[in-house]
Each structure stands twice: as C-alpha cells, then as structure tokens.
Image (cartoon, grey):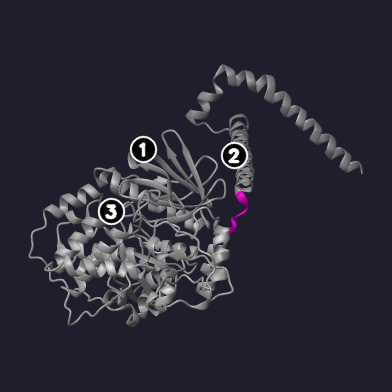
Amino acid sequence: MSGSSRSLEREYSCTVRLLDDSEYTCTIQRDAKGQYLFDLLCHHLNLLEKDYFGIRFVDPDKQRHWLEFTKSVVKQLRSQPPFTMCFRVKFYPADPAALKEEITRYLVFLQIKRDLYHGRLLCKTSDAALLAAYILQAEIGDYDPGKHPEGYSSKFQFFPKHSEKLERKIAEIHKTELSGQSPATSELNFLRKAQTLETYGVDPHPCKDVSGNAAFLAFTPFGFVVLQGNKRVHFIKWNEVTKLKFEGKTFYLYEKKIILTYFAPTPEACKHLWKCGIENQAFYKLEKSSQVRTVSSSNLFFKGSRFRYSGRVAKEVMESSAKIKREPPEIHRAGMVPSRSCPSITHGPRLSSVPRTRRRAVHISIMEGLESLRDSAHSTPVRSSSHGDTFLPHVRSSRADSNERVAVIADEAYSPADSVLPTPVAEHSLELLLLSRQVNGATCSIEEEKESEASTPTASEVEALRGELRALCQGHGGPEEEQVNKFVLSVLRLLLVTMGLLFVLLLLLIILTESDLDIAFFRDIRQTPEFEQFHYQYFCPLRRWFACKIRSVVSLLIDT
C-alpha cells in the first residue's frame, strides 16, 4: 500500500464537549467532512432539529471558528490530534419555546443556562432570581426542608457573581411559586422568560470603532447590533443590511444610508466576524436555501475571501420540524452540582469561597466581561439601565480592612449584569478599568475560553490570549494610521492595475501591428479605417524613430 493511501486511511480521535459538560469521543478518517462528524454527534444525542447547533473549535493561533460541514475536519483544525471541540448553539431560535421536540428545548436550555452563568444573558435582579429558580426546580425538584437546609441556594452558582439578597430571593421563589413543576415544564418556562430578555441570542465580537472606542459587534435573530458599555449604539434589521465585507482587520457593514466601520484585533478575528455575519444573515433573512449565494469580500483592487453558507435557513427548519412524527426520545438530564464540588465550571474566584462579610461587597472586573463574551457569547441589544431593581454599578470608598483603593458594588444594586461590559463606573475608559483589575489582584486568564473551546489551559495559551486582549485595549495603530495605511494601499493597487492594463494594451498593439496572425478578430480590427490611420500616421513613424535611435546606440557601442 502506498504512503498516500495509508495516510488517507489513518484514523483520528475527536473529543466533543457537550452542553452538559459531558464528552463524546469518536474516530474519523483523514478526509472526513465536518458534516460526517456533526451527524455522528446528532445521532448520539438523538437530535433531529439540529440546524440550530454547530461545532466550535480553537485553532493553533487561538482563534475561534465554527466547523464548516463541507470541508475536511482535519484540514480545518490544523492542529495535532487528538482533536477537542465543543457542541454549542450556533443559531438561537427566535422563539425557543416553539421548538418541536423536548430534547431540542433541553439543549437550548443548557446553552442559555451557560450564558446566564457566564454573564452573557443580562437581566434585572427580579428576572435573574426567577430564571435561577427555574433552574433549581428543573434540576433538584420541589423544595424539601429535609434535603434543602437554610441557604441551600447559595451552594449553586447561577451567575458570575451574586449576593445574599439575590440568593434569598431565588430560594423564596423556588419554595413558594414553582412547587409541582416537572423538569420539562420548568425548562419551558425558563426559555419563555429568557426569550423576552434583550440579551437573548447574541454572539458578541470585540472590536474598536473609528474613534478607538471599545465595542462589541453581534448578530442576532433580528439583525445586527453594536454594543458599547451598557448601550446599544446601532441596531440594523437584516432586511436593511445590504452588504458585509472585511479587509485585513477592518470590517464594513453597508446599510441603505450608512457604512459602519470597525477594527477587529486580528485579521483572523475579522474574517471570523465576517463569516458569522454572512451565515446569520442567510439563516434568518432568506426564505429558502436555494437563494443562498457565494459572497466575496474582494473588490477591484483587493483579492479577498469567498464564502457560502451551506445549511438550511430558519423558515425551512421550522417547516421541517413541523413534520417530525416520532415518540419523544428519552432525555438523560444531568443533575445540578454545587459549585464547591464542581471545579470544571469555575469562573474566577468562587463566590461560595468568599467569607459572608466580604460577600456584601463583590468586585466586578472588566476582564471578566471580556472573557465571558469570548466564548460562544450571546446577548441582544442592551437597554440603558433603569432605576428600581436593575443593576447599576456604584463605586464605594476603600474597605476598612484594606490599604488599597478598590471599586466595589453594593448588594442592593446588584444583578448578574447590566452591561455587556460590567464596569464599576460606566464612564470609565477600558484602559482605566484594566488597570483597576490589576490593582484588585484578580487573575487575567481567560478560563471560560479554555473551558468552552479547548482542553485545560496552559500557561502559554493564557499568556497568548492575555496578549490579544491587551492588543485590543491598547489599539492597533489608531484610526488615523489605519486610514492612512488604507489610502496608501489603495493608491498602490490603483497603480498596479493601471500598469497591468497598459502592458496588456501594448501587447495587443504589437500583436495587431507586427504579427501575421490571421484570426478573424484581429483581421476585423486591422481593416477598420481608424486602425489603418493610426498605423500609418502614428505607429510606423514611431517605429522608425525607435529603430533609428537603437542603430545610433549600437554604432556608439561598436565605436567605443
């Protein structure tokens, strides 16, 4: 057997982390497509409404990607086996409660629960307490005084940070309002409530605008949004988006009246952002998959990338789901584990390990906001905070037991998050907040990125991702320098194209005047009066002049 044949028949081990943190391991051939692996996974999960889901991985350069089903798995990953990937919701259903099968709703429930835990599903305190109570009811059942002592809700971590007041509210709702609800009913109510929140179903991408301000771009079931701090600065519906394009680290979105320009931290991140936009627009906007077209980011002076969405669109998925007729598959629900005994879901310092006296003041860092949003982060357009039970960060004076000045947040003003960037002071700049993070002494690692996308983080991986975040915060040359570089590149491309056209015209002219090619196209051109006039009045005298000059130069060279 030849070496190439042995290489093609080689098997590779793949491990896919599921939404309940269990793992599915299989082997694939070298030339296996992404669709083959995805079908294996969906068969394992007994999942038919699979178009909402995808497989995410991180390449050797620490850039996230969605696995393309039409391409080889091995070639896409570009890393050494065994391969590690994650099964996640890729396209959030516009109405998750309307999904046909309970198994699909359960998987979406697990994804949104992850979003809530990692600070991506942002909401008011009252909504946060209700969502957490639904999770408790779905996973531990009715309240039982014998099994659930005082303060039992504090042993579970629903949010990045939460207070004693919120824990008491969760327990109160669980005890008094949800008794008798089955897991399926609690999950359905959870989905119905989550779907009404403004931060449902967004996948934020960190960028900078033309003024150098940090922003997050996101594609939702309803359109394109730009988030800055706790404000939605742009929202454009899918039918108003005319074009998506990227060039290097620059991303462009064309609307009927405006062009939005943003800068990603790396060209690879910008390309990933562009591809996500193309896929989301096709999935949510089009009526049928036959309308999908190949999209190119190139223009006259720039050879860009070409990409085509290969799946079904939302309307087709809903029509196909309505035709499903089978016995509901059995669902193996994973019971909830207290945060103290589950290190695999640790995200920063555990609240349960903080003394009760210190829980009265919880530190919120900008880095946690960034790391929460870098996984399969999901949120929708964000409203400005309103008073009442919404979360509005406030700065207190320094603690009596500490010599350092740190920004803390009061219990009575806390909810999981009120902003895509949960900042101690909303008007503080990104750089000042990063500095405050370092003063607080908290780690700057990106544990959520590793937990959700790859295996246990190494020191080099943490340092690389930390450097990427610093690069984003420190800028990449400034918007003015970016504009100058773009102008210079455009001029150079224009010159190159012009020189190429002139060379082609000169070559065509020589063929027409000097060659004996008797082709109908050339013959017709030669017989035109304009060409004959040009040939005898301009070209022949010019040729004689060049010949004379060449003979003169040759004579001088011979004499010398």
Q: Earlier in the sequence, mark 1 or mark 3?
A: 1
Q: Which residues are magenta?
A: 474-478
Q: Earlier in the sequence, mark 1 or mark 2?
A: 1
Residue hosting label 1: 240
- Label 1 element class: helix
Q: In the drawing, does residue 114 fall left or right of residue 421?
A: left
Label of residue 497 in the image: 2
Tell me the quadrant of the picture where the C terminus can be found: top right
Q: Amino acid at mark 3?
A: Gly
CA gap, disc 1 and disc 2? 33 Å
Mark 1 or 3: the one toward you? 1
Does residue 477 belong to the magenta stretch? Answer: yes
- Label 3 element class: loop
Q: Amino acid at mark 1?
A: Glu
Q: Is residue 296 above or below residue 111?
A: above
Image quarter for residue 335? bottom left
Q: Is residue 426 above or below residue 511?
A: below
Q: Amino acid at mark 2?
A: Val
